Amino acid sequence: MSDLDNSLPWLDALKWDADGMIPAIAQEQSGRVVMFAFMNRESLIETARCGNAVYWSRSRRRLWRKGEESGHFQKVLSIRTDCDGDVLLLTVEQIGGIACHTGRESCFFNELQGGRWIPADPVLKDPEEIYAK
Amino acid sequence: MSDLDNSLPWLDALKWDADGMIPAIAQEQSGRVVMFAFMNRESLIETARCGNAVYWSRSRRRLWRKGEESGHFQKVLSIRTDCDGDVLLLTVEQIGGIACHTGRESCFFNELQGGRWIPADPVLKDPEEIYAK
């Protein structure tokens, strides 16, 4: 990635936070919101270049090619930003139909019911099976 | 709001950031993601209590009852959190069918096309008309 790539006008138009991050929501074509993560410039450029979602892992401090371990890649169909330019919304085709490391379709499986968080979605595949090498 | 209310187990189960905030995605029943904002404990309690989305305005440093000026309230149908408990996903009925201050259905109207952000959705109502007093 050259310095030129890193200062493209469409990247400069976004509002990056103090850590150089922007939050990104991933939504399936069905409308299901499956994930929320962060991108830095490099990961967004790489996402736009390769066509699969690439996030920035804040815990591991490195590019995170979603699906690199699980095979559950996200093919990016569109990228939008909001009126403030400080959030991204990706429309994705979720390969394998599982976005969550718990083996569920979506990471948003805990629903507030009667003052408690209740897991409201089924586990589609055992995580041990997903991450078995 | 009593101290007791502010330390409910379902609130403590969430991961609040260093500023006491949690990001919240608002999604219409249709699947359309319409907004992204932040909540603090008080705004989430108030959201759960009154049934309309109440965010925390970081710029104005006060509770922000979505729709308080525009009339475009968000009736909350469900509240979910993700596997990490650090993001909220609200399913809402968007009163007036307009979530964005620009008069569009969704704040996510700018789509990346050919290396530029293109406004891809129509303005449904003139903002001057929305905010006229």
Image (tube, coloured by chain):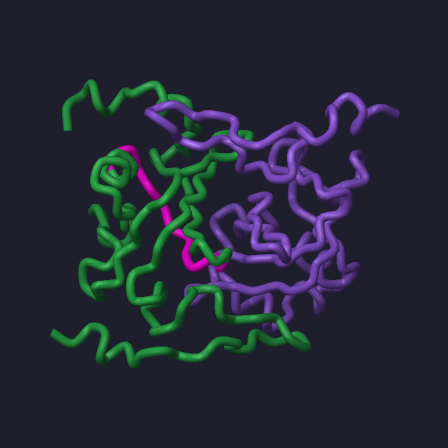
Chain colours: A green, B purple
- Would residue A35 be visible to someone looking at this image? yes
Viewer-proximal residue among A93 and A10: A93
How many numbered markers are drawn?
Answer: 0
> In which quadrant is the N terminus of chain B drawn?
bottom right
Q: Residue at x 52, y 64 (%)?
A: B81
Q: On screen, B32 above or below A116?
A: above
Q: In x, y percent, where is residue B73?
A: 76, 46
Instruction: Describe residue B116's horizontal placement relative to residue B22 as left or right.
Output: left
Residue A11 visible (yes or no) = no
Q: Quadrant of residue B133?
A: top right
Q: As drawn, which residue projects farthest toward the right? A: B133
In the image, B27: left or right of A55? right
For image coordinates 57% across by 32% down, the residue present is B121
Bounds of the magenta segment: A32-42
Q: Quadrant of residue B35?
A: top right
Q: Nearer the viewer, residue B30 or B103?
A: B30
Q: Main secondary structure of the magenta part?
A: strand
Left or right: where does residue A38 sit relative to residue B34? left
Q: Is residue A93 above or below residue A130?
A: above
Q: Is residue A21 left or right of residue B102?
A: left
Residue at 35% in and 55% down: A93
**Residue A33 colored magenta?**
yes
Image location (x, y in percent) of residue B45: 70, 60
Magenta includes B99?
no
Residue B8: image location, x then y, percent: 64, 70
- Foreground of the two, A38 or B72: B72
Residue A27 coordinates in the image, percent (x, y): 44, 53
> Extreme left residue here?
A133
Closer to the camera, B41 or B114?
B114
